Image (cartoon, grey):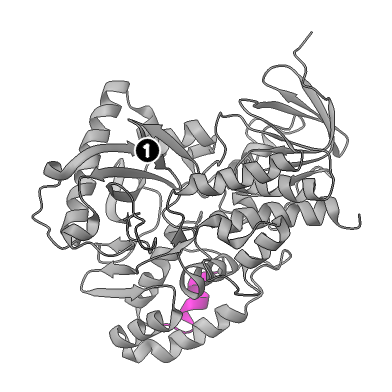
């Protein structure tokens, strides 16, 4: 007999204990639904989790929590999700950024959580483009980007209607793409609008203790409502009958049934769990974009070296290229530099050590094809290369980083694939999003990355929206 869980049937089964899965679970538990969250790994958070090494806890997904607004701001995504989950604003411990920038050869644009400052920066650096930029910003502000029935359209074409300077166009796309585009070269205009708002109209913040504050908050809320969560509990197969999912077979051999299933595993990955789909289902919608990230722990605060920015989105090439890395393991010509120390944590509050994180695009297939010895050697090589690029962009570029480094680590697309299950280690999932969350089965729905809501706030809103639309509506 296969091992059994405490209960065999649930009103709703949620696959994945990431931000979307936990938020969906809370929303359903608040409504009195009998719900269980199944997670293959031993830690919650999914793409926005953390791990421990040498007594330190490292965030793997959180550079910043986007969509930041001050307490009391109404009508924004953050406010909406807190209301829907019945979580108090102060529980998130959100501390706003110092300020960030987009750095390209010969041009920099600063921005913070006040859009007027970013607008003034564009006017300073691109005086002939400012009217077009303002028209674009107004269009983005009023676009119905969350319309679940809207058809995809080119963000590049939309931006080019207002912006004629390719440099400004690239500088606008660099942060927006790095923080949420699963598409190469271009992105859906609705996705662009969502990201533009979350980065520039709203802004960046971070809890002092990082992403684990948010994960613990969601876990505790879900548990307090009686929600069930099973860790190290992977899905082997979703059985089907006609147009419905009929049962969920776990890796352990146990079988659950549910009235409805919400999967946060990804569109392609979910399709391939279904027994009525071929092993190569949805091959044309597998994400191609993966990343590597270095983490350096320093013996001083970044500000001691003159590094005061919170996040720097950089490009060193003639044109910004956002696409799969073909010929190398890593593309060091663009990326994200992040200093978790550089948030306004308040009097007497700061991280005990200095942190420098550098993210760049990487080739999943090449990293996964390496032998173990070559893998470790290439990690060491690319760690050093990315530090060189970073120091070349920062003040005190002649600094000997090794003299101040007390710990370091690096994750690669191989790491992403192992801990998320995303094919190709695709951080942002499938390029073609499924906004309404519907699948080929009547009672199986998608939430999370492949529904198209991005970032931590977006992921939570995705879980809430799918719970509301497909389970609670009409109840």
Magenta run includes residue 260? no
Number of on-image labels: 1
User: Residue at coordinates 60% horizontally, 43% vertically from top-left?
Assistant: 18
User: Residue at coordinates 20% horizontally, 61% vertically from top-left?
Assistant: 393
Tell me if mark 1 has few (under 14), some (14-19) or many (20+) residues whose alpha carbon lies within 10 angstroms of its own: many
Please state if 204 lies on the left or on the right of 270 as rendered: left
Where is residue 358? Give x, y as percent. Answer: 30, 50
Quarter residue 278 falls in: top right
**Main secondary-structure element of the magenta-colored stretch:** helix
Q: Can residue 185 be seen? A: no
Where is residue 430? Give x, y as percent. Answer: 57, 49
Residue that numbered label 1 is attached to = 412
- The stretch in magenta equals 154-163
Where is residue 9? Give x, y as percent. Answer: 85, 29
Question: What SS does tag 1 mark?
Answer: loop
Position of the C terminus by quadrant: bottom right
Where is residue 192? Give x, y as percent. Answer: 53, 68
Position of the N terminus by quadrant: top right
Q: Can residue 318 be seen? A: yes
| Nearest to the observer: residue 25 or residue 121 | 25
């Amino acid at each position: 007999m296969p091992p059994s869980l405490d209960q065999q049937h649930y009103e709703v089964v949620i696959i994945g204990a990431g931000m979307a899965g936990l938020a969906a679970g809370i929303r359903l538990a608040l409504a009195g639904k009998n719900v269980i969250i199944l997670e293959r790994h031993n830690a919650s958070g999914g793409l926005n989790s953390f791990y421990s090494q040498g007594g330190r806890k490292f965030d793997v997904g959180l550079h910043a929590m986007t969509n930041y607004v001050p307490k009391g701001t109404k009508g924004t995504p953050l406010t909406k999700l807190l209301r829907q989950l019945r979580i108090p604003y102060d529980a998130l411990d959100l501390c706003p950024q110092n300020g960030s920038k987009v750095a390209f050869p010969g041009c920099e644009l600063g921005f913070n959580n006040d859009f007027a400052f970013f607008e003034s920066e564009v006017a300073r650096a691109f005086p002939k483009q400012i009217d077009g930029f303002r028209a674009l910003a107004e269009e983005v502000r009023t676009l119905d980007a969350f319309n679940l029935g809207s058809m995809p359209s080119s963000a590049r074409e939309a931006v080019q209607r207002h912006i004629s300077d390719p440099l400004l166009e690239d500088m606008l796309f660099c942060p927006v793409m790095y923080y949420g585009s699963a598409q190469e070269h271009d992105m859906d205009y609705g996705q662009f609008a969502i990201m533009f708002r979350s980065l520039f109209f709203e802004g960046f913040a971070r809890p002092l203790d990082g992403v684990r504050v948010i994960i613990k908050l969601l876990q505790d809320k879900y548990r307090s409502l009686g929600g069930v969560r099973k860790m190290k509990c992977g899905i082997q197969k979703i059985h089907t009958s006609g147009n419905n999912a009929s049962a969920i077979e776990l890796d352990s051999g146990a079988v659950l049934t549910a009235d409805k299933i919400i999967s946060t595993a990804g569109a392609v990955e979910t399709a391939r769990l279904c027994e009525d789909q071929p092993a190569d289902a949805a091959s044309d919608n597998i994400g191609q974009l993966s990343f590597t990230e270095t983490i350096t722990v320093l013996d001083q605060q970044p500000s001691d070296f003159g590094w005061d920015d919170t996040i720097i989105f950089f490009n060193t090439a003639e044109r910004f290229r956002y696409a799969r890395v073909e010929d190398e393991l890593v593309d060091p010509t663009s990326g994200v530099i992040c200093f978790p120390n550089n948030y306004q944590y308040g009097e007497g509050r700061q991280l005990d050590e200095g942190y420098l994180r550098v993210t760049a695009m990487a080739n999943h297939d090449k990293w996964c094809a390496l032998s173990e010895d070559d893998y470790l050697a290439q990690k060491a090589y690319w760690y050093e290369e990315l530090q060189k690029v970073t120091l070349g962009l920062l003040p005190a570029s002649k600094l000997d980083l090794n003299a101040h480094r007390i710990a370091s680590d690096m994750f690669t697309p191989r790491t992403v694939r192992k801990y998320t299950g995303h094919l190709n280690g695709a951080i942002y999932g499938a390029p073609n999003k499924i906004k309404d969350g519907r699948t080929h089965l009547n009672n199986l729905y998608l939430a999370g990355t492949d529904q198209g809501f991005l970032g931590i706030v977006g992921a939570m809103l995705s879980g809430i929206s799918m719970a509301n639309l497909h389970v609670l509506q009409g109840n």
